[in-house]
Image (cartoon, rainbow, N blue to C red):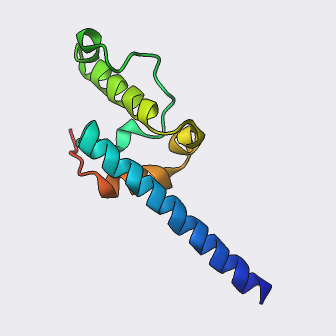
């Protein structure tokens, strides 16, 4: 019986986590950038100013670094480690925000 309670608790915790990530993703998509790709996740925070337009848009690499830094700026700090290390976070965000696959 206790294992059933544990599973229910884990499921509720997962649902709460997914709802929180979904809310953050929707907010970011509306307020910041709607085109977020999977490559912007599971990498360390870049050491760039995401709001410096002179350097942010200078190259494809600086655009990626700028958007990734902006994501780190907007996502609460207690989720940064999860954002870097957990593909579930990336997958959840990419389900919510439409994204383009650049090749």
Q: Is residue 85 visible?
A: yes
Q: Position of residue 9 (x, y in %)?
A: 66, 74
Q: Is residue 91 visible?
A: no
Q: Is residue 56 above or below residue 64?
A: above
The residue lying at 36 percent from left, 24 percent from top is 65
Residue 63 lies left or right of residue 5; in this view the side is left
Pick the front one: 101 or 8: 8
Q: Position of residue 40 (x, y in %)?
A: 38, 37
Pick the front one: 50 or 94: 50
Q: Position of residue 27 (x, y in %)?
A: 33, 46
Residue 15 lies left or right of residue 54; in this view the side is right
The residue lying at 20 percent from left, 45 percent from top is 100
Q: Quadrant of residue 81?
A: top right
**Residue furthest top in the image:** 54
Quadrant for the C terminus, please: top left
The residue lying at 23 percent from left, 43 percent from top is 34
């Amino acid at each position: 019986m206790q294992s059933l309670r544990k599973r229910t608790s884990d499921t509720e915790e997962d649902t709460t986590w997914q709802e929180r990530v979904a809310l953050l993703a929707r907010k970011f998509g509306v307020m910041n950038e709607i085109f977020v790709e999977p490559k912007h996740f599971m990498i360390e925070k870049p050491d760039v100013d995401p709001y410096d337009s002179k350097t942010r848009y200078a190259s494809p690499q600086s655009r990626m670094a700028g958007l990734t830094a902006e994501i780190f700026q907007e996502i609460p700090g207690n989720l940064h480690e999860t954002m870097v290390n957990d593909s579930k976070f990336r997958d959840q965000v990419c389900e919510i925000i439409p994204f383009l696959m650049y090749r």
